[in-house]
């Protein structure tokens, strides 16, 4: 029975891990959730490179217009977690350090019209949960609802 | 469980209970001590500090820019739009109960609005103001 449970657990874990593209597994870290999540949704570490996270965490006193300084210990712990789970390659990097400026983000959102980005329920590209309804539990294309409640029409997407 | 283990568990439990037991008044007392002999916290001074326009940040000249002039109501971050829960303990019992949070936010916000870290005297005055109604 125990073995069966372990197998089931492994199978479930693999499902999440392999479902890249439609779904995105988000690793857990209490400090990251508490500190980053007290101001905005916690953005998955894989959406920027380790190098970008390092720059971002090194400039928290000027964090996109707000002071978000952490004490040295928390900063170090969170950065370690981000780097360990960071993305790689140019498509996950942006000189602005904004996830919404990375090639990956732009490609994934290429079909979203400018009108939808400035919709009062959306306002900002950083407002993931405006359309990704269960974003706190991870990303899934099936959860996407456009402003006004319209379901996202799935299209062929070969990107992950 | 051995007696030793039980004792350890009890110690841990009471330790964490103590950590949670900080109150707004504890912070006023702590900062008053740090401010040095002869200092007496004043809600009136805290109020004028809170509404003073420091002119350091264009978008948030004073604390009230984001927190509003009534600490019993919710505020809004002028840049990010994030809703800020009330600061007055009467309206939000979670306020001024954890050293780490109090220090973190005072450091961030003082640096941003005042242009430097706040002094213990300023912190004591401000929290006293929040305790005594928090309406400017």
Image: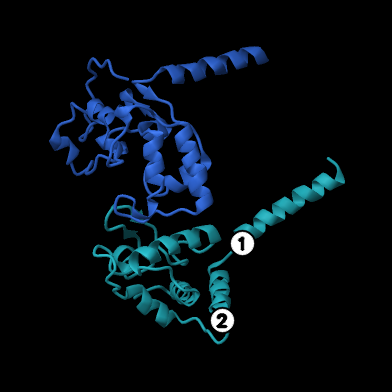
Chain colours: A blue, B cyan
Foreground residue among A83 and B105:
A83
Q: Is residue B7 visible?
A: yes
Residue pointed to by mark 1: B21
- Rendered location of residue A154, percent (x, y): 24, 19
Task: Name the residue furthest right.
Answer: B3
The chain holding disc 2 is B
In the picture provided, is B46 more to the left or to the right than A100?
right
Which residue lies at the image location 25% right of the left edge and 36% below the top edge? A101
Residue A33 in picture, x, y percent from top left: 47, 42
Q: Quadrant of residue A41?
A: top left
**Residue B109 percent location from the top left of the image:** 38, 63
Q: Is residue A63 above or below residue B26?
A: above
Report whether B81 appears left or right of A56.
left
Find residue B32 and report its image quarter: bottom right
Q: Which residue is at the front of the view, A98 or B63?
A: A98
Residue B98 in sight: no
* Horizontal side of residue B61 vs B131, given as left or right: left
- Which chain letter matches label 1? B
> Which numbered dot is residue B36?
2
Give the residue at the far bottom of this rendering. B38
Neighbours of disc 2 within 10 Å: few (<14), some (14-19), many (20+)? few
Same chain? Circles 1 and 2 = yes
> Neighbour class for label 1 at 10 Å: few (<14), some, many (≥20)?
few
Q: Nearer the viewer, residue B132 or A135?
A: A135
Q: Quadrant of the N terminus of chain B?
A: top right
Residue drawn at x 57%, y 72% is B30
Q: Quadrant of residue B46?
A: bottom left
């Amino acid at each position: 029975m125990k073995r069966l449970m372990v197998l089931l657990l492994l199978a479930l874990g693999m499902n999440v891990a392999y479902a890249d593209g439609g779904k995105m597994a988000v690793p857990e870290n209490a400090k990251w959730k508490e500190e980053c999540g007290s101001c905005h949704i916690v953005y998955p570490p894989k959406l920027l490179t380790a190098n970008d996270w390092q720059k971002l965490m090194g400039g928290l006193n000027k964090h996109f217009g707000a002071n978000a300084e952490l004490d040295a210990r928390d900063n170090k712990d969170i950065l370690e977690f981000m780097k360990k789970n960071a993305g790689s390659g140019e498509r996950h990097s942006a000189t602005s350090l904004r996830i919404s400026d990375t090639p990956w983000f732009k490609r994934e959102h290429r079909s979203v019209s400018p009108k939808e980005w400035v919709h009062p329920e959306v306002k900002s590209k950083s407002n993931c949960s405006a359309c990704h309804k269960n974003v706190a539990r991870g990303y899934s294309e099936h959860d996407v609802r456009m402003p006004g409640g319209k379901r996202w029409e799935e299209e062929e997407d070969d990107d992950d | 469980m051995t007696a030793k283990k039980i004792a350890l568990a009890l110690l841990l439990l009471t330790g964490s209970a103590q950590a949670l037991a900080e109150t707004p008044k504890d912070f006023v007392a702590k900062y008053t001590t740090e401010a040095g002999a002869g200092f007496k916290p004043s809600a009136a001074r805290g109020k004028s500090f809170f509404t003073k326009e420091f002119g350091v940040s264009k978008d948030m000249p004073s604390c009230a820019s984001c927190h509003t002039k009534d600490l019993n109501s919710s505020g809004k971050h002028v840049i990010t739009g994030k809703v800020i829960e009330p600061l007055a303990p009467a309206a939000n019992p979670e306020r001024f109960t954890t050293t780490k949070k109090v220090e973190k936010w005072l450091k961030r916000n003082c640096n941003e609005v005042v242009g430097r870290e706040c002094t213990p005297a300023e912190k004591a005055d401000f929290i006293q103001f929040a305790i005594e109604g928090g309406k400017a």
